[in-house]
Amino acid sequence: DAGVTQSPTHLIKTRGQQVTLRCSPKSGHDTVSWYQQALGQGPQFIFQYYEEEERQRGNFPDRFSGHQFPNYSSELNVNALLLGDSALYLCASSWDRPSYNEQFFGPGTRLTVL
Amino acid sequence: GESVGLHLPTLSVQEGDNSIINCAYSNSASDYFIWYKQESGKGPQFIIDIRSNMDKRQGQRVTVLLNKTVKHLSLQIAATQPGDSAVYFCAETRTGSYGKLTFGQGTILTVHP
């Protein structure tokens, strides 16, 4: 089992550009959550996908959007990039349960916006 | 970002010492609390969790203590090893949130051989 995988590992973009990050969940998991981790801070919840729909969302603007595919993999899209979007973007997967269920994190994609 | 976010609390210990990392949480409705370890260039790795109806839980070399009265969580690492050097985060979640995590700021643990 490869666990949660993310691509690319690193990415450099310029302000105003658009970016797509990808995540493959751990085998057997059907729920994918995305987090943004700025330097020196804890991860912040962006949104969560289940059954190809956005189920819940954190306090992030509409420039952040996502998608989940039938195989449960997911994409995070960020439009009109700002310098402040520079961060480590983490994907976490789990089984669908309303109560707590251990979240398994991928290694992240380091996005740098110049 | 906020400058305060760049100044993570730090804890330096000698190999073999016991380490205690503290965390304050904010949401009284949270009923699960989790400790994560994050090494440089990696995603957070689960260490141990505790449910709100417990005040202590032990794992291998780690113990988590929960004080709901003051909304405080601590992680104790016994016989700390250089491989324990990392950033440690506490996180909280609640039933009904499908595992959505709210993370604390983090503590940098450095273990000297």
Image (cartoon, helix red, strand yellow):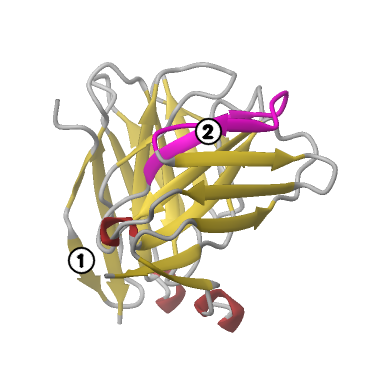
In the displayed structure, B94 sits above or below A97; it is: below
In what element is the residue under mark 1?
Answer: strand
The residue segment tinted magenta is B45-60
B49 or B6, which is in the foreground? Answer: B49
A35 or B81, which is in the foreground? Answer: B81
- Residue annotated with mark 2: B49
- Do dots 1 and 2 share one subunit? no
In the displayed structure, A54 sits above or below A20; it is: above
Q: Is residue B28 found inside the magenta-colored segment of the image?
A: no
Residue B12, how many percent across, how many down? 44, 73
* Residue A41 located left or right of residue A94: right
Residue A105, how many percent across, how many down? 34, 41
Chain holding disc 1: A
Q: Is residue B47 found inside the magenta-colored segment of the image?
A: yes
Q: Quadrant of the C terminus of chain A?
A: bottom left
The dominant secondary structure in magenta is strand
